[in-house]
Amino acid sequence: MDLYVVVLRLLHIVFGVLWVGFACFVPFVLLPSLMDAGPAAGPVMGAIQRRGLPKIMSAFAGITILAGILLLRRVSGGFRSEFMGSHMGMALSIGALAALIAFAIGMIMVRPAMTKAGTLSEGLGSVTSDSERAALMATIGALRTRGAAGGKWVAWLLLFALAAMASARYL
């Protein structure tokens, strides 16, 4: 038994499941619910940010990616071309690429949009003018829409990565 591989697989699978689960829950369940709630979503968004969900998801992703790279390096014998050119190697590589693209979209598009929407939502209570409130709500809505769209891309890419990696051994 190779304890190094066992630990890497556990880290990769457990944190990958958490990353994919949150990545699917947020754009398909949480964000539509928050959009339905309208201004009442502001305190919820603030509470989610204070509890560190964006940082937690980034940590899940980072651990998954690092463990995956180390695991692929070990399993492939140092990224040997013979392995990387095999069906299994190509499936793992394509899955890894999809996960890396998902991570980039999450960090560049989704996280900043949702963080800004949450910050602006918390400030809604201090806005007294109806016109200011409407403008702020429009900005928050646009940010949530952008975050949700990016989040859906992230979720689908991660589901693709999951399918590629889960089936790689059998190709």
Image (spheres, rainbow, N blue to C red):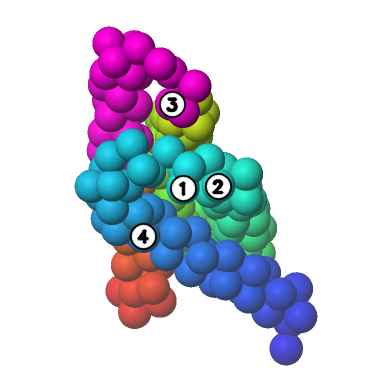
* Circle on res. 25: 4
Looking at marks 4 and 1 on the same chain, the residue that comes earlier in the sequence is marked by: 4
Inspect the magenta stretch and tell me whether residue 163 lies in it: no
Q: Main secondary structure of the magenta part?
A: helix
Q: Which tag is nearer the camera, tag 2 or tag 3?
A: 3
Residue at (33% x, 37% y) in the render: 39
Question: Of tags 4 and 1, which is closer to the observer?
Answer: 1
Residue 137 located within the stretch drawn in magenta: yes
Would you identify the image quadrant in which residue 142 lies? top left
Nearest the eye: 65 or 29 = 29
Mark 4 in CB contact with mark 1 (< 8 angstroms) = no
* Amino acid type indicated by mark 2: Ala
Q: Amino acid at mark 1?
A: Val
Residue 25 visible to an observer of this rendering: yes
In the rendered image, which residue does mark 1 sit on? 44
Q: Would you say residue 77 is visible in this rendering?
A: no
- Please name the residue that numbered disc 3 is placed on: 124
Tell me the amino acid under the disc marked 4: Phe
First in residue order: circle 2 vs circle 3:
2
Secondary structure of residue under mark 3: helix
Q: Earlier in the sequence, mark 1 or mark 3?
A: 1
- Image position, residue 35 (x, y; %): 26, 43
Q: Using the image, tell me which numbered label, if any, was put on residue 47.
A: 2
| Range drawn in magenta | 124-151
Identify the residue at image location x=43%, y=26%.
124
- In the rendering, which numbered label is found on residue 90? none
Find residue 147 and report its horizontal and vertical position in percent.
Answer: 34, 35
Report the Cα–Cα distance between label 1 and label 2: 5 Å
